[in-house]
Image (tube, rainbow, N blue to C red):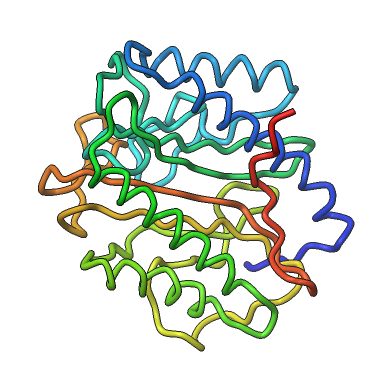
Amino acid sequence: MIELRTPAEIIEMQAAGAFVADTLAALKARAAVGMNLLELDAYAHTLIRQRGAESCYLDYAPSFGSGPFGYVLCTSVNDAVLHGKPHDYTLADGDLLTLDFAASVDGWVADSAVSVVVGTARAEDLALIQLTEDALAAGIAAAVVGNKIGDISHAIGSLAEAAGLRVNLDFGGHGVGRTMHGDPHVANNGRPGRGYPLRPGLVIAIEPWFLQGTDKLKTDRDGWTLRSADGSRGAHSEHTIAITETGPLVLTRPRPAA
C-alpha cells in the first residue's frame, strides 16, 4: 500500500534523514586502508545507540536474504554492490566500497547509500561512482508533482544506457516511512509517463546502482551479499526524498561541515 505523508510528518522525518546522513559522513571519513568492515559496523552501532535510534537492518529477514541480517550496516566491496554483509575483511588500497545505511528515529525511517574508493583510485571506478551520483540527481530532479514513477526510472536509466551500461531491474528504489521498504517500487530504468502519479507527501528512496560489465547478479555464500556475475565492480548512490508542492526535498542530504 502506498502511503502519503502530511507536511507535519515530513518535518518529523527530517530527524531520521539528518541522522542517516551524518552517520554515512562519519563512516565515509573512517573508511581507509587498514580499516576492517566489522569495525565500521561496530562504529555505526555505537552511533545508533548514542542517538537512541533503531537499526533497520539488524533483524531484517526478507525473502531475498538468508535469515536475519544481523548487522546495522551494509558494506559492499568491489564486485559486491548490494546488501554486503559485514565480515572480517580489511580494506586494501584501491577498494571500491559502498556503505548503505538505514535507521529509524522516533518511528520514522531514512535510507541512504554512498560509494567511495579507499586509497588509490582507478579512473574507471571514479567514473562509475560519478555516474550513479549523476543518475541519482537526475532521478531526484524528475521527482516532481505531475510526473510519474516511470519518469524517475527513465531519468536514471537513460544516463546508464548512454554510458553503455545495462541496468538490472531486480532491485531499485522504494517507498519509505514507518518501515524501510514499502511501495512503490522505483526501478532504475523504465518508460516515462508510466506508473504511479507523483503526489505531495510521497516519500521514496531513489537508488541507482550499476555494474561495470553486466546487469547480472549472484548471491554470495553468506546468503546476502549480491555480487556481479562477471566479477566487475559496482557502485551505488541513494537518497530518501519527499515529494512536495515546491519540489523534491532530500531528507538525507549531507549537512555542510561546521
Which residue is depicted at the point 16% across and 45% down?
Answer: 232
Between 52 and 130, which is closer to the camera in this rendering? 130
As drawn, the residue found furthest toward the right would be 8
Which residue is depicted at the point 31% across and 66% down?
Answer: 160
Which residue is depicted at the point 33% across and 11% down?
Answer: 34
Q: Is residue 161 above or below residue 63?
A: below
- Which image quarter is the N terminus in? bottom right
Image coords of residue 154 (percent x, y) = 42, 77
Image coords of residue 249 (percent x, y) = 71, 59
Left or right relative to 49: residue 154: left
Left or right relative to 110: residue 72: left
Which quadrant would residue 205 be assigned to in this image? bottom right
Q: In this view, does 114 lie above or below 207?
A: above
- Which image quarter is the C terminus in? top right
Q: Is residue 175 above or below residue 148?
A: above
Which residue is depicted at the point 43% across and 33% down?
Answer: 74
Left or right relative to 29: residue 48: right
Q: Is residue 122 above or below residue 258?
A: below
Left or right relative to 127: residue 3: right
Image coords of residue 42 (percent x, y) = 50, 14
Image coords of residue 18 (percent x, y) = 71, 38
- Tally the numbered discs: 0
Which quadrant would residue 140 be assigned to in this image? bottom right
As drawn, the residue found furthest toward the left would be 230
